[in-house]
Image (cartoon, rainbow, N blue to C red):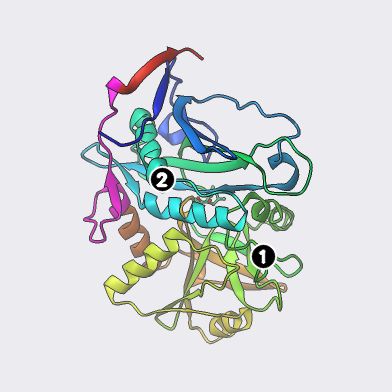
Amino acid sequence: MTKFEIRQQLTLVRKEKPEPDTLEFGRVFTDHMFVLDYTEGQGWHDPRIIPYQPITLEPSSMVFHYGQTVFEGLKAYKTPAKDVVLFRPEKNLSRLNKSSARMSIPPIDEELALEGLKQLVSLDREWVPEAPGTSLYIRPFIIATEQYLGVAPSKNYQFIIIMSPVGSYYKEGINPVKILVEKEYVRAVKGGTGEAKTGGNYASSLKAQQEAAASGYSQTLWLDGKEQKYIEEVGSMNIFFVIDNTVVTPALNGSILPGITRDSILQVLGMEGIPTEERRISIDELVEAHKAGKLQEAFGTGTAAVISPIGEFLWEEQKIIVNNGEVGPLTQKLYDTLTGIQTGTLEDPFGWTLTLESPADEKIEEITTF
Ligand code: COI
């Protein structure tokens, strides 16, 4: 029993599920979605689960013009016992509200959103893939829906959750990626929106990413927006280095995304007694550490990317090859520990996973065919 009334309208026609070995990132979507509306004066209302379908918006809807939108990314996994588990979902919902606060979007009730999320995943639980390295990626997002061309916070919004069975984010899988250190463009500055998960941060990164890809690099590493000296984050990940047996990651400074995987890795390292430092680290320090033979490993962390080893950085025509371009031992161990906890093959000493119950059939009101 829950205190929230979430209407469910189910599809009659279940879509065909992709073969596990064909899964890419974010290309196919499950049978249902969760929707919640916001109307000024009324607040958030009408929570519902409906068949996955197009949304109809007028061209004057504010999201199309000024980008007032926020999003999240989290995952559901299937355990060996066939339970479906979510990984730290409450963290994503609270970060969504923090992003919303920066973007002048009214906060959602995190308890209601979690209940909607649990019911949605439960309903589409057959879509949670089981093969190693696969999961169900969950994308909650909010868009400004008022029809108005003035620059002002929208009076209406929609909060939607869609889901996609995924394989690895990078085509390299767990193999090391090559990263170009960006010199020309910047991602964020202090006081900007770097800390928020909002579409504009990603739209403005595309140009640099395209240029990196043209030179054979998977992603860009962003330096700070003021001096272009200090390392911030990679396009879709936070970044870690192993330097002289200490794990170093840039401190959260207002322009870096506070990653939930980043936080999880810091906690796992703490539990293992491995020294960590959250601090400013300059690109010059990285170059020097490499020259001195002290740069042992580098990896990125993110929900989509999980833990992605980095085998090479390109900085001012200089190639920094890390661990001979191979997966480092600590990176591999962290990958195994984190994915083990997430998929239930290892014990979860942190209480991070939330096991779902089966769908509540009695809540079905109406059957629809799409
Ligand atoms: C995630 O890791 O979930 C992200 O949101 C990164 C990305 C795919 C934009």
Name the residue nearer the viewer: 199 or 285: 199
Say if the magenta span includes residue 342: yes
Residue 276 to residue 66: above or below: below
Residue drawn at point x = 79 percent, y = 41 percent: 149
Q: How many marks?
A: 2
The answer to whether residue 12 shows anywhere in this view is: no
Residue 332 to residue 288: above or below: above
Side (left or right) of 2 relative to 33: left
Q: Which residue is mark 1?
A: 192
Badge 2 local density, few (<14 within 10 Å), some, or many (20+)?
many
Q: Which residue is mark 2?
A: 75
Q: Which mark is residue 297?
A: none
Say if the magenta span includes residue 227: no
Residue 281 to residue 24: above or below: below
Q: What segment is highlighted magenta in the picture?
A: 341-362
Q: Are marks 2 and 1 in contact (CB under 8 Å)?
A: no
Residue drawn at point x = 26 percent, y = 31 percent: 358
Q: Nearer the viewer, mark 2 or mark 1?
A: 1
Secondary structure state at the residue bearing disc 1:
loop
Point out residue 296 in the picture as x, y percentages from the top left corner.
46, 76
Point out residue 195 in the picture as x, y percentages from the top left corner.
57, 63
Amino acid carrying label 2: it is Lys
The answer to whether residue 131 shows anywhere in this view is: yes
The answer to which quarter of the image holds residue 99 is bottom right
| CB at disc 1 and ligand 1 closer than 8 Å | no
Secondary structure state at the residue bearing disc 2:
strand
Badge 1 local density, few (<14 within 10 Å), some, or many (20+)?
some
- Closer to the N terminus: mark 2 or mark 1? 2
Distance between the Cα atoms at labels 2 and 1? 28 Å
Point out residue 356 in the picture as x, y percentages from the top left corner.
28, 39
